[in-house]
Image (spheres, grey):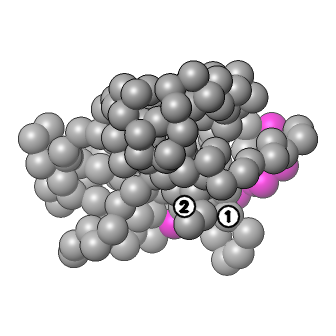
């Protein structure tokens, strides 16, 4: 996949939308110093080229009983492609797993898990995570405070 060339206006669009994805094109244009038509054309191009892949609501986890965060290191018994595919597919079916990353290092995957509290996390670990395909061991790191949480951010 070829990387899209981005100029300073494109980066400005991405920075602004990362903060407020619902702003009008007129407001976006004003913030980045363009008129509406060129700003809208750039926005459409960024969407068409897959730089912007979608828009979503950011939800306060405290309001939906999902403020408890744990990071889980996963070691697998088998890391051949079929085993990785089976694990990946199964992970997608566990709603408490917010993120899943294949890691190069002393373990195979790192999961970010959200739950109501430590007791509900323990149930997710016992009933779901430990039963994922090829899991040999897990190691949990409980978050005491989320200092910074953001999605992908364009460089300044």
Q: Are marks 1 and 2 in contact (CB under 8 Å)?
A: yes
Quarter-wise, where is residue 143 in the image?
Answer: bottom left
Residue 98: percent from left, percent from top: 41, 45
Q: Secondary structure at mark 2?
A: strand
**Is residue 146 placed above or below 6 in the rendered structure?**
below
Residue 140, position as x, y percentages in the image: 39, 69
> Which residue is found at the position 44% from the left and 26% from the top?
25
**Magenta highlight range:** 73-82
- Mark 1 lies on residue: 103
Quarter placement of the C terminus: bottom right
Q: Where is residue 36? Give x, y as percent.
A: 50, 26
Q: Residue furthest right?
A: 2
Q: Is residue 123 left or right of residue 130?
A: left
Residue under numbered circle 2: 110
Q: Which numbered disc flags the more N-terminal residue, 1 or 2?
A: 1
Using the image, determine if residue 154 lies above or below residue 25. Answer: below
Which of 51/79 is in front?
51
Look at 27% across and 68% down and name the residue there: 146
Please state if 45 lies on the left or on the right of 114 as rendered: right
């Amino acid at each position: 996949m070829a990387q899209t060339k981005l100029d300073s206006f494109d980066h400005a669009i991405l920075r602004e939308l990362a903060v407020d994805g619902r702003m009008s094109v007129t407001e976006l244009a004003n913030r980045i110093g363009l008129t509406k038509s060129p700003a809208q054309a750039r926005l459409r191009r960024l969407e068409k080229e897959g730089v912007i892949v979608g828009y979503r609501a950011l939800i306060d986890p405290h309001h939906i009983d999902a403020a408890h965060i744990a990071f889980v290191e996963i070691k697998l018994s088998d890391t051949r492609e079929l085993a990785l595919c089976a694990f990946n597919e199964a992970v997608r079916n566990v709603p408490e797993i917010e993120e899943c990353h294949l890691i190069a290092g002393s373990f195979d995957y790192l999961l970010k898990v959200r739950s109501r509290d430590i007791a509900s996390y323990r149930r997710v670990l016992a009933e779901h995570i430990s039963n994922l395909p090829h899991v040999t061991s897990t190691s949990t790191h409980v978050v005491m405070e989320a200092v910074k949480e953001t999605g992908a951010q364009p460089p300044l």
